[in-house]
Image (cartoon, rainbow, N blue to C red):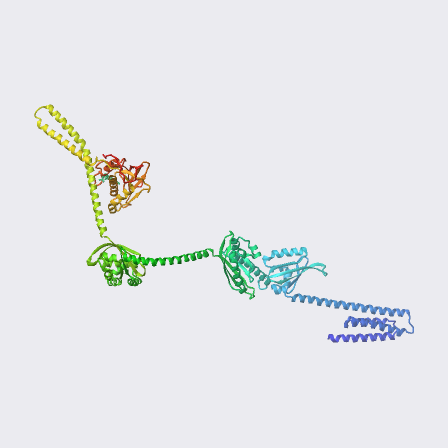
């Protein structure tokens, strides 16, 4: 039946039943026992109405019971009937109360069921996983979000207690530990773990599990939830990563700023510096923190530069423009060095107006001081240039004067036009000018034709036999010398290869074909001008001829001396056999005298032998005396001078044999006493031998003529770099006629030794450690003697 219809019908039925019971009770005398039927009325009202309806119905039924009793017993009320009436009323009241109480219970149950459904609905509608666990921490309830999040059926998970299967294995240890601890201590679990999602991925989720006393179970149960904090955790991790990267970058930045060799700084828009790198402390010796605290950077700037610096800083910061300034900064050692500061304003990227200055201070001391030096130098240079210019002007005037009136010959030629032609040839890539001109004679002719004589001086005109300089200037330059074209080509080469000057010999061709041998020099002046001067070699050539004649004479004298000495030696050698011959002849004569007549002829012959022998001896003696037994003249000799003269004398031979000769002696060398002619002859002999010994050798050819002063003597040494003396020759080297040369006569050393002995010394020879022979002898020092020029005599004879 329709619920809506059921209620009014039941209520009507109840009213009808109540009316029937009342009527029956009022007309019968059952002493209220009919009133028990009112209980049925109450049951019907209870089924159809509310608690209030039941209360009202009970009140009505009691009223009707009382009314019935009054009607029935108004005339004859009895106690027993009254008591029955009262009991009936009590029964109706108690039943009504019971029905109301039942009604309330049912309402409460419905309400409870509704609340439970609501809670379930609520729990299932929130987007979090919720659970309830028992005091041991075992989950007994999971809401529907569990399935939505993990994709697993919550009931089967609960059944198998498999809810931890969805936790990331790495997070299990911390989960177990944290939950066990929280359960044991009845505290809150607050933990983030990774939970496997329905799609298999893991997401960070926050577990928040709280203990709470349950009045139902009267135990401390736990209620918890799982919320998705993945994005938050990931964002946090990202933040951490970025933060650590930032920290690394910051450290790197600090390391970087500390490693640059400049001071780096940062300031706010008001000029307050809030950062210095470590270099600041190294340079100024100041504590960075303290300096930033005090903002007294300016105190280290040189007092003379402070005002300028502050002004520039003020201007830059006021106009928010770049700061540039130089100043002297006091360094840690107290010295001031020039520094340059550059600072640039940087606007923040957030668009605010809060600009910052970033800048650096670098050491420019060396540049500044070198600039200063360059400036000073420039000033000095300018001054010098001025001086030089005026000096040049004076020189130019002097040059002009000198040029005209000098006895030296000068000619000035203009090569500028020829140089232009050479430039073109060079630009065409020609590297060998001479070869090029040889194959292009017309080009050479054109180039030579462009050379002009600009001026010559009177001395040159005179030397070449011209009456006026103009005649000579008018001559084509190439015709002024026998090899004029060659001389000019050499001058072209001088320009072509960038040389300053050339020199050489040529024969000038003067007026009427006059030939003048000259030594010429050509110097390049500015603007393509060439200045040449000439030395007349006519005289020099005569002198050279005389020198060669003297040389020949010396050689001849040498030969004569050698032959003379040779004769002396022969005389010495012959003396003894001739004496023996004389003695023998005399003995023969004595014997013949004893033998008697018949021997007159022998006697005569032997007498002749004796006479002749005596004659030979006389001749020999005379020759010997003439040649060697003459008294010598001792003179004070400046050894260095004598050595130099000797070298000059044999220069020709040395050059021809390509031998270098050096004289080694101290400038304080004292004079010796000796016969200059003989000493020179000894030196010449020894040097010639050395030259002979080294002739043709490929290794170095050098003769050292050395003088070492000792206490009373000067040691003279002639050493060479030749083969030295063979061991088997050294003993007989000074023997007469010992020679290893095909054209030698072996008398030179013998004569030298005699001459040296005559001067008071002894000639010895040794082989040098490094190779070559060394002939040495001592000469007595001229102690207390006046310097050279004064004669002193000593005597002695060789042999
Ligand atoms: P000559 O020069 O006529 O040979 P010397 O008496 O001057 O006669 O020399 C004798 C020899 O001594 C030479 O033939 C040569 O063998 C040797 N001699 C002399 N000087 C040197 C020297 N400087 N180096 C090597 N041998 C030398």
Residue 469, relative to residue 42: is it above or below? above
**474 vs 571, nearest the viewer:** 474
Q: Quadrant of residue 733?
A: top left
Residue at position x 77%, y 76% from top?
A: 9
Q: Quadrant of residue 747?
A: top left
**539 vs 7, nearest the viewer:** 539
**770 vs 481, nearest the viewer:** 481
- Residue 143 relative to residue 597: left or right: right
Q: Position of residue 128 (x, y in %)?
A: 64, 64
Q: Position of residue 318 (x, y in %)?
A: 54, 64
Residue 707, relative to residue 120: is it above or below? above
Tell me how many marks there are: 0
Residue at position x 66%, y 60% from top?
A: 209
**426 vs 570, nearest the viewer:** 570
Q: Position of residue 11 (x, y in %)?
A: 78, 75
Q: Which quadrant would the C terminus be assigned to in this image?
A: top left
């Amino acid at each position: 039946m329709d619920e809506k219809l059921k209620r009014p019908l039941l209520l009507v039925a109840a009213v009808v039943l109540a009316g029937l019971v009342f009527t029956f009770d009022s007309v019968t005398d059952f002493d209220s026992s009919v009133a028990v039927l009112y209980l049925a009325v109450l049951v019907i009202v209870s089924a159809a109405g509310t608690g209030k309806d039941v209360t009202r119905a009970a009140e009505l039924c009691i009223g009707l019971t009382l009314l019935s009793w009054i009607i029935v017993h108004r005339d004859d009320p009895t106690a027993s009937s009254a008591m029955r009436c009262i009991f009936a009323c009590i029964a109706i009241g108690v039943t009504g109360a019971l029905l109301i109480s039942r009604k309330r219970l049912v309402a409460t149950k419905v309400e409870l069921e509704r609340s439970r459904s609501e809670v379930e609905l609520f729990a299932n509608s929130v987007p979090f996983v919720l659970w309830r666990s028992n005091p041991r921490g075992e989950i007994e309830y999971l809401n529907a979000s569990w399935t939505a999040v993990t994709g697993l059926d919550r009931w089967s998970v609960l059944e198998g207690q498999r809810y931890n299967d969805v936790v990331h294995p790495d997070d299990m240890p911390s989960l177990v530990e944290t939950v066990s601890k929280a359960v044991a201590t009845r505290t809150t679990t607050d933990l983030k773990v990774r939970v496997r999602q329905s799609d298999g991925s893991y997401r960070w989720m926050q577990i928040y599990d709280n203990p709470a006393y349950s009045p139902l179970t009267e135990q401390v149960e736990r209620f918890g939830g799982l919320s998705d904090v993945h994005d938050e955790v990931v964002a946090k991790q990202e933040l951490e990563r970025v933060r650590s990267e930032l920290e690394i970058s910051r450290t790197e930045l600090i390391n970087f700023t500390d490693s640059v060799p400049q001071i780096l700084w940062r300031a706010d828009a008001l000029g307050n510096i809030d950062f210095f790198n470590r270099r600041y402390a190294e340079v100024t010796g100041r504590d960075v923190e303290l300096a930033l605290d005090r903002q007294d950077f300016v105190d280290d700037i040189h007092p003379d530069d402070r005002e300028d610096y502050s002004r520039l800083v003020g201007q830059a910061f006021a106009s928010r423009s770049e700061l540039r300034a130089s100043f002297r900064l006091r360094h840690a050692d107290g010295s001031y060095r020039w520094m340059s500061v550059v600072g640039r304003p940087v606007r923040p990227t957030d668009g605010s107006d809060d600009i910052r200055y970033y800048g650096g201070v670098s050491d420019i001391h060396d540049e500044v001081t070198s600039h200063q030096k360059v400036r000073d130098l420039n000033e000095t240079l300018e001054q010098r240039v001025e001086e030089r210019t005026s000096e040049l002007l004076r020189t130019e005037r002097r040059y002009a004067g000198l040029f005209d009136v000098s006895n030296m010959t000068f000619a000035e030629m203009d090569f500028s036009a020829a140089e232009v032609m050479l430039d073109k040839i060079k630009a065409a890539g020609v590297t060998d000018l001479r070869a090029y001109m040889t194959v292009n004679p017309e080009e050479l002719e054109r180039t030579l034709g462009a050379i002009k004589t600009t001026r010559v001086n009177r001395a040159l005109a005179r030397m070449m036999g011209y009456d006026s300089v103009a005649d000579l200037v008018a001559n084509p330059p190439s015709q002024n010398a026998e090899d004029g074209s060659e001389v000019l080509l050499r001058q072209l080469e001088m320009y072509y290869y960038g040389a300053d000057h050339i020199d050489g010999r040529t024969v000038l061709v003067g007026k009427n074909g006059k030939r003048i041998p000259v030594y010429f020099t050509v110097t390049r002046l500015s603007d393509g001008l060439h200045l040449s001067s000439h030395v007349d070699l006519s005289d020099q050539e005569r002198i050279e001829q005389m020198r060669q004649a003297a040389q020949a004479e010396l050689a001849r004298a040498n030969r004569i001396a050698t032959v003379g000495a040779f004769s002396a030696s022969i005389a010495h050698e012959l003396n003894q056999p001739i004496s023996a011959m004389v003695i023998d002849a005399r003995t023969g004569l004595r014997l013949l005298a004893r033998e008697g007549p018949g021997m007159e002829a022998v006697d005569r012959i032997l007498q002749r032998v004796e006479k002749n022998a005596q004659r030979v001896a006389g001749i020999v003696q005379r020759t010997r005396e003439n040649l060697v037994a003459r008294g010598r003249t001792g003179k004070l000799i400046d050894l260095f001078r004598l050595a130099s003269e000797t070298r000059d004398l044999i220069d020709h031979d040395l050059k021809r044999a390509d031998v270098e000769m050096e004289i080694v002696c101290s400038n304080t060398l004292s004079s010796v006493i000796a016969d200059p002619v003989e000493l020179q002859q000894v030196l010449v002999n020894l040097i010639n031998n050395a030259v002979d010994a080294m002739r043709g050798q490929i290794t170095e050819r050098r003769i050292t003529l050395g003088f070492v002063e000792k206490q009373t003597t000067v040691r003279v040494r002639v050493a060479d770099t030749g083969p030295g003396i063979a061991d088997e020759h050294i003993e007989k080297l000074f023997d007469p006629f010992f020679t290893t040369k095909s054209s030698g006569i072996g008398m030179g050393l013998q004569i030298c030794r005699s001459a040296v002995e005559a001067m008071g010394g002894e000639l010895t020879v040794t082989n040098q450690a490094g190779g070559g022979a060394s002939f040495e002898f001592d000469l007595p020092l001229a102690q207390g003697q006046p310097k050279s020029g004064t004669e002193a005599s000593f005597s002695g004879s060789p042999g």
